[in-house]
Amino acid sequence: MIKSIKRSVLLFGAALLAVALVAPAAHAATPLPGYTQFKGCPTMAEKPKSIVCVRTEVTSGNLKMGNKNVPIEKPIVLIGGTDGNLQNFVYNSDGGLRPAKQKVPGGVIGLTGLTWLLEFFGIEALTLYATTELAGTPDVNIFEEPVELPIKAHLETPSGVLGKNCYIGSNTNPIKLNLITGTTSPPAPNKPITGKAPSFEFNETNMISYLKGGQFVDNSFAAPGANGCTLTLFGFIPISLNSIVNSQSGVPSPAGTNETRQNFNVEMTDSEIVYGP
């Protein structure tokens, strides 16, 4: 299924390259009507090798690390551009991985076990959100699995009780997802899980290729520990919460104990169609 889709997209890409005769002007940074969903994909003037605009949207799923399982309730969108082989992903200031705060079950109390925090902040202020951020350059070529996605999880609260820089993973020690639509071969104790290849559609009117209804899976990745989690009491007494977060959440956790399922759709087209010649 994936191979047949790949052949169709490569033929589509060849047709686009045949009409891509004029590089866009440097000021052509606003997508044309009907293509605003690709905002964040660089023009060729910004990045000369960015000739294909790609928008990937994770619509639902989950990310389980250690003993914490966070449902994906708000869409996570990755937008950028690639070369003609869907490699060398780049993006401008409007692109990349769009912030999408996912509510973490159990809140800060479930994350730390520090029930006394309720006396200082109240339950609403201790609501916990996890925002997925890039921790390296992602691979968006769905036709060459696994799709590599280095990320880190930013943990935030309305009260700021964890500080501004509380993360699971970092740029130097990311969560390294290797996403596939087939069946995984994880280390124990995890068992194989199976994703779903997307269906392919091409709209001749807007010249956009669509990959719909796919599911990425990975349950072979390791999860690093917490970093930068700091509680500041009385405005001036910093207390590191990293070890508490690690102990309560079961991270770092080795490969074979974590899991993600990500239901996704992809749109792609030529950057000159998005911005005009």
Image (cartoon, grey):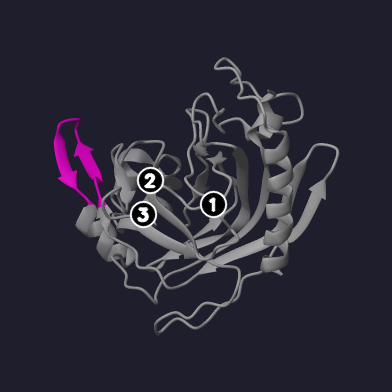
Cα separation, mark 1 vs mark 2, equals: 22 Å
Q: Residue 154, which numbered label?
A: 2
Cα separation, mark 3 vs mark 1, equals: 36 Å
On whether residue 260 falls in the magenta region, the answer is: no
Depth check, mark 1 against mark 2: the one in front is 1
Q: Which of marks 3 and 2 is nearer the N terminus?
A: 3
Closest to the observer, 67 or 266:
266
Residue 193 screen position, x and y as percent: 56, 77
Mark 2, other Cα within 10 Å: few <14 / some 14–19 / many ≥20? many
Q: What element carries label 1?
A: loop
Depth check, mark 3 against mark 2: the one in front is 2
Residue located beneath label 3 in the image: 109
Q: Which residue is drawn at 54% across and 30% down?
A: 42
Cα separation, mark 3 vs mark 2, equals: 17 Å
Is residue 185 left or right of 34 when viewed as pictured? left
Q: What element carries label 2?
A: strand
Assign the C terminus to one quadrant of the image: top right
Residue 136 screen position, x and y as percent: 37, 47
Closest to the observer, 212 or 127:
212
Q: Is mark 3 on a helix, strand or loop?
A: helix
Q: Mostly what secondary structure, the magenta segment?
A: strand
Residue 210 screen position, x and y as percent: 74, 50
Q: Earlier in the sequence, mark 3 or mark 1?
A: 3
Q: Residue 140, which numbered label?
A: 1
Depth check, mark 3 against mark 1: the one in front is 1
Q: Give the range drawn in magenta.
A: 227-241
What residue type is disc 3 on? Ile
Q: Looking at the picture, does residue 208 appear above or below residue 244?
A: above
Mark 3, other Cα within 10 Å: few <14 / some 14–19 / many ≥20? some
